[in-house]
Amino acid sequence: MEKQVYFSGILSDKPEQNPDFYNWNRVHVRYCDGASFAGEGYDGEHNLYFRGQRIWSAVMEDLMSKGMRSAKQVLLSGCSAGGLASILHCDEFRALFPQSTKVKCLSDAGFFLDVVDITGGHAVRSFYDGVVTLQGVAQNLPKFCTSRMDATLCFFPQYMVANITTPTFLLNAAYDTWQIQQALAPIRVDPKETWKACKFNHSACDSNQMQILQGFRNTMLNALQGFAAFDKNGHFINSCFTHGQIYDPNKWYSDNSPTIGDKRIATSVGDWYFDRSQVKAIDCAYPCDNTCHHDL
């Protein structure tokens, strides 16, 4: 774990880098449990305790005692596993505050899909099932989801995000690089590494691989529909090969930041949070967007 955390992007205190949130109180919660702060289990064989939910509750209790309970405006955000955590805990977070407090949630690169891998299997579902089972996550997942489907599926945002009552914003790349590498074509389903070049360099993808990647994008957009139908929610789905955009100042808010309709990510999130306008932004398919900051 790195000793120093750099407050940049949405955490920056510089108005030129973070125009809407630069003068807010900002808290970075260290990620430490491996299950998006949702675990509550014990592995007797290896003497491992999983206490993600307790850690979350303790951190919230501490922050509330330090003055967060008096906040008038609050935004719960996170990236990747933290983005998933901001979805899983969104309504729970909202419940900490009086109704007069403006509370919203932002997930960056946390819209993990229950996607079919390149062999037609469910590699990432199997991986998630291991996490949910080992860490006893089921008891901490939203009951409106676990009452009607398997708990492992409820660890995927697509099956529960439309039922979150707190206004939520989904920021995600349509070609999420973590999901391409770990869900769509992980090494365990590609032992001959036919996807190795493509998944680490999108310009090396052949036409068949690009067709599969476009299918992944379509799966994401289809999974978004129920969530997007609510006016209170917002989204920004750009056609970039990346994973995580709120902490990178060049992606969040700079002269060359990614845009959809000439609007940067930070502006879009700010417009949605402060109710300046609805934000339902979906990029055209790759390779149309020349504002992207591709990671690979």
Image (tube, rainbow, N blue to C red):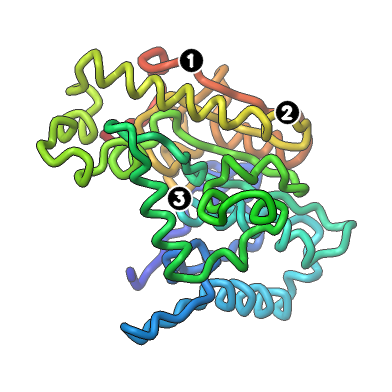
The local secondary structure at tag 3 comes to loop
Rendered image: mark on residue 229: 2
Amino acid identity at mark 2: Ala
Please tell me which of labels 3 and 2 falls first in the chain: 3
Going 37% across and 54% down the picture, which residue do you hit? 127
Q: Position of residue 292 (x, y in %)?
A: 39, 26
Going 65% across and 63% down the picture, which residue do you hit? 25
Q: Quadrant where the N terminus lies?
A: bottom left
Between disc 3 and disc 2, the foreground one is 2
Q: Nearer the viewer, residue 170 or 217?
A: 217
Query: Is there a contact, CB below 8 Å, between mark 3 and mark 2?
Result: no
From this viewpoint, which residue is outermost toward the right? 100
Reading the image, the residue beneath label 3 is 80
Going 54% across and 25% down the picture, which residue do you hit? 221
Q: Residues within 10 Å of mark 3 (few under 14, many from 20)?
A: many
Amino acid identity at mark 3: Ser
Q: Position of residue 154 (x, y in %)?
A: 58, 51
The local secondary structure at tag 2 comes to loop
Q: Is 157 situated above or below 4?
A: above
Spatial CA distance of label 2 from label 1 is: 19 Å
Reading the image, the residue beneath label 1 is 284
Q: Position of residue 31 (x, y in %)?
A: 45, 66
